[in-house]
Image (cartoon, rainbow, N blue to C red):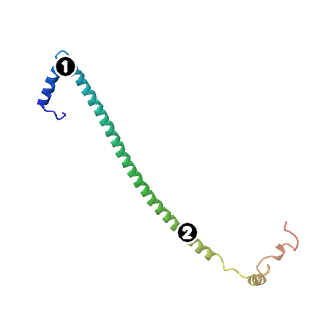
Amino acid sequence: MFGIGMSEMLLIAVVALVVIGPKHLPDVVRTVGKLFAQVKRTTNDLRDHVDKEVRQFTEMEEVQEFKHSVESELRTVNSTVRDYVQHEVSQAEREFDAKESAAVPPAQTPDETATADAHSAPPAAAGMDPSALPEAGKLPS
């Protein structure tokens, strides 16, 4: 138990019997036994508490490792999504610019616009009834 052999224990018992006496020896042994039991309970409680703290610390380390791995994965996903969105936006802008440039006719100079208006056909030539047009200065009713 404490590295004490049987011969040492017998010697301690004989010294205790001589010093304490046979009358009080049972009470002293009972008290010492209770003291050892209480010390054992206290050390077991302390050991359990330390083990519990070590387990919590280990779990905390595992949680920290998990947190770091999740944060790393989130950074990777965030970067991937950002790159994908930027690629899609730039592709959409290129497509929009291409469609816009194809839909808009080339700009005319003011001289070309005036020439085109002068060459436009009169309403009668375009197949319209000239009497259906409003007279100059009058609004249609």
Structural distance between the alpha carbons of marks 2 and 1: 101 Å
Specify whether 66 is left or right of 86: left
Q: Which residue is mark 2?
A: 92
Q: Residue at x 23, y 24 (%)?
A: 32
> Which image quadrant is residue 20 in?
top left
Which comes before the other along the chain, label 2 or label 1? 1
Specify whether 122 is left or right of 86: right
Q: Residue furthest front?
A: 19
Q: Residue at x 62, y 76 (%)?
A: 101
Q: Quadrant of the C terminus?
A: bottom right
Specify whether 13 is left or right of 35: left
**Nearest the eye: 57 or 74:** 57
**Nearest the eye: 1 or 71:** 1
For badge 1, the amino acid type reads Ile
Q: Quadrant of the N terminus?
A: top left
What is the number of the mark on residue 20?
1
Q: Is residue 64 above or below residue 10?
A: below
Residue 41 horizontal/vertical position (percent): 28, 30
